[in-house]
Image (tube, grey):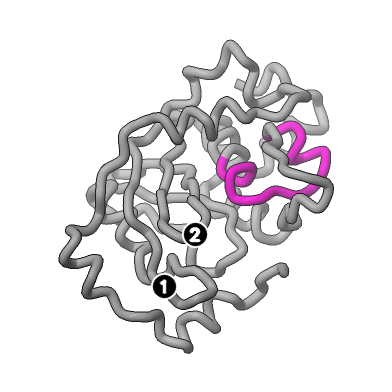
Amino acid sequence: MLDGFNPGERRVFARLKTPDQIQRFLDEELGYNQEKQGPTCYSPRLVLRHGMAHCMEGGLFGVAALRAQGFPPLLLDLEAVRDDDHVLAVFQQHGHWGAIAKSNFAGLRFREPVYRTLRELVMSYFEHYFNLAGEKTLRNYSRPVNLARFDHLEWMTTEEHVWFIPYYLTEIAHTPLLTPAAERRLTRVDPRLMAAGRVGRVD
């Protein structure tokens, strides 16, 4: 799965031997891409070259790194209202789901593989998914998309931006998490949780 990468790139993937090591790499070795030069959608190769990633780019790198460990390359999309969407590189161990993610919010990153269903996994993000106005904004989630469907476009190693992946995610069906009545009853985020979620945030 790494044939298209050069030796230096393969060495990076080779030292990421577990999902939590991938997450630490995303958190500690890649800066947060603020897109100061304009919108980007880096392939995993370009993430390594630039040393930074935002949510989508980090998710794509996470999927590629999981694939190098033998996991299927699965990306799951989270849809929000009045907020940015988010993506998760998801994986299963011993029949339970976990996730890897790059985020500017502390609570939207790694999940241990302890969730029996994808809905359980997604709901673990609900209280931590909020906008700067203090609204809880997560509403829908997609099925996991196997990115092998894009292998013919060389999504892992291309020198071009991979906009075709987020465009595809906007087109597929998503499952609602809340009923309209539940959505109307939502309360504001506790200020302490909001402060905790913004620890380390890059503005």
Percent x, y of residue 55: 59, 50
Q: Name the residue nearer the viewer: 70 or 136.
A: 136
Percent across and percent down for residue 154 are 64, 17
Residue 53, magenta (yes or no): yes
User: Are there few (<14), some (14-19), or many (20+) residues within 10 Å of tag 1?
Assistant: some
On the rendered structure, is 127 left or right of 47? left
Q: Is residue 29 visible?
A: no
Image point (42%, 41%), residue name:
76
Ranked by sequence position, the earlier of labels 1 and 2 is 2
Image quarter where the N terminus lies is top right
- The residue under the point 58% across, 59% down is 103
Farthest residue in the top direction?
152
Q: Residue 101: which disc?
A: none
The magenta stretch spans residue 45? yes
Q: Is residue 190 above or below residue 49?
A: below
Looking at the image, do the residues carrying marks 1 and 2 touch, with CB atoms under 8 Å apart?
yes
Which residue range is magenta in the image? 44-59
Q: Going 59% across and 76% down the picture, which residue do you hit?
A: 198
Q: For label 2, count other residues whose C-alpha is less than 10 Å away and answer few (under 14), some (14-19) or many (20+).
A: some
For disc 2, the marked residue is 83
Residue 3: image quadrant is top right
Which image quadrant: the C terminus? bottom right
Q: Mark 1 = which residue? A: 135
SS for dot 2:
loop
Q: Give the main secondary structure, helix, strand or loop, of the magenta stretch.
A: helix
Q: Is residue 167 left or right of residue 139?
A: right
Secondary structure state at the residue bearing disc 1: loop
Circle 2: residue type: Asp
